[in-house]
Amino acid sequence: MALNFLSTAEIRAISFLDSSNSSTQHLKLKGNLSCKRKDIQTHSKKICCSAQPARGPPPAWPGRAVAEPDRKVWDGPKPISIVGSTGSIGTQTLDIVAENPEKFRVVALAAGSNVTLLADQVKRFKPELVAIRNEALIGELREALADVEYKPEIIPGEEGVIEVARHPDAATVVTGIVGCAGLKPTVAAIEAGKDIALANKETLIAGGPFVLPLAHKHNVKILPADSEHSAIFQCIQGLTEGSLRRVILTASGGAFRDWPVEKLKEVKVADALKHPNWSMGKKITVDSATLFNKGLEVIEAHYLFGAEYDDIEIVIHPQSIIHSMIETQDSSVLAQLGWPDMRLPILYTLSWPDRIYCSEITWPRLDLCKLGSLTFRAPDNEKYPSVNLAYAAGRAGGTMTGVLSAANEKAVEMFIDEKISYLDIFKVVELTCDKHRNELVVSPSLEEIVHYDLWARDYAASLLPSIGLSPVPV
């Protein structure tokens, strides 16, 4: 197989499914899934599947959002659990609870290792149950809460996180924990009949084939808490079956949206961390620069809304005001707009199908006249080869999408640690996905999903000696 290695002279649209230079190539994957690559008459190339597994996982929302008439309505505050309470999603969720105490109350909190912040959250929100994943810190947490009159139950380790996720009083569980560590708690919450306010990407990118059938079995709603998928979710409200035609994901374009392709060989870590719109964590900022974040969101959109990959598109929208759009069968385009603020999609996952009034002081209202203009452009597949990689992984399905995500996470870590170059990120991900082809599992168990997530990270790390520390050669 001839791999498309990136060069500084030309960064080509790449795919781990590309096995020759012919215009159409075929690859037999496990589970009788046959994929082929076809060149189309544009500047980019598109990956197409000639066959799909006999029956894929059902989408969380099949192109429309419907609230059953018999869904429970809360007379008092709606009880919620938060897994990952000290992270960005968790703290913003608690901001919402603090502003709307008559609407929401916290019954359980789980955190990783930030004892000080977790203790402060316990004192303020008085949950019934608290968990800290790092078991070695249980004594420190108990000491921090020693003078608290209202003492919650404390359970350490993964067992505690799972108990928080399936707390009997919780109606909705906010899954803000990062990585595959969020899979088991999410599965536990679904099995306990809790609706999921989804902020953990691995739940669907890696776990979609397992998680979605489980959610349907237990009649659980998965409500997206990230801005792009929340925008789509808001736009499909009231659609009739079969009305959705296309999903349009907007992307800021990241740090290099205005850089020429030839200059990417010079990228330093500091360059990749300069997001033009806002300040975020290092990993997501690099993902925005490579556009891997948007490729992963394509996979999530497929699982969430049942859209075929041919019907999911990416548009660069530098202002980040339109958070995403849908097109209906009659060619109408519906969009959700607003200032970039993660609290808004989080709030909607908690209040759906209702809307909660927001103060203009803490929730600034959008002023289009002040904004002036909105612009759009197609993503450059030479600058962002991650897009083709993500579509190829999505069409392969099964464990391939989780491998893509895990390999990217490891590659970004190595880049931030200055062990590989920026362009090597794409190479590491492609090589890892290519290696996984012979072991692809189309309908994986939870154990297989976790296994291949760990395998992908280890394999990506093992590529370091073969890649070297110098820039990608011309």
Image: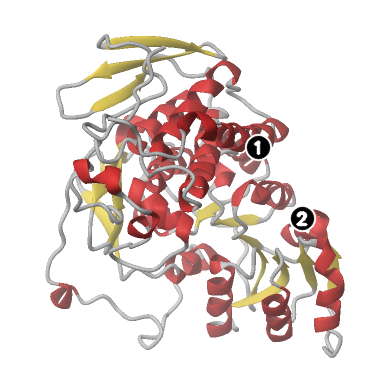
Residue 325, relative to residue 396: is it above or below?
below
Residue 454 - label = 1
**Camera-side residue: 310 or 134?**
134
Q: Amino acid at mark 1?
A: Leu
Where's the C terminus, which quadrant? top left
Q: Residue at x 68, y 74 (%)?
A: 106
Of the residues under marks 1 and 2, which one precedes in the sequence?
2
- Viewer-proximal residue among 348 and 237: 348
Query: Quick one: SS at disc 1?
Result: helix
- Left or right of 65? Residue 126 is right
Q: Indicate the position of residue 429 as horizontal and vertical percent values.
A: 46, 34
Residue 335, quarter of the rendered image: bottom left
Which residue: 85% across, 81% down? 143
285 and 303: which is toward the camera: 285
Residue at point 16%, 62% (across, down): 374
Single out the mark in the foreground, 1 or 2. 1
- Residue 300 x, y percent position in the rendering: 46, 43
Q: CA distance from mark 1 to mark 2?
A: 20 Å
Q: Left or right of 372: which side holds 280?
A: right
Tally the marks: 2
Disc 1 packing (10 Å; few <14; some 14–19; many ≥20): some
Q: Amino acid type of disc 2?
A: Ile
* Residue 237 at least partly seen: no
Residue receiving disc 2 = 162
Q: Is residue 438 above or below residue 233?
A: above
> Based on the displayed image, in which of its 4 quarters is residue 441 positioned?
top right
Colouring mode (rainbow / by chain / secondary structure / one colour): secondary structure
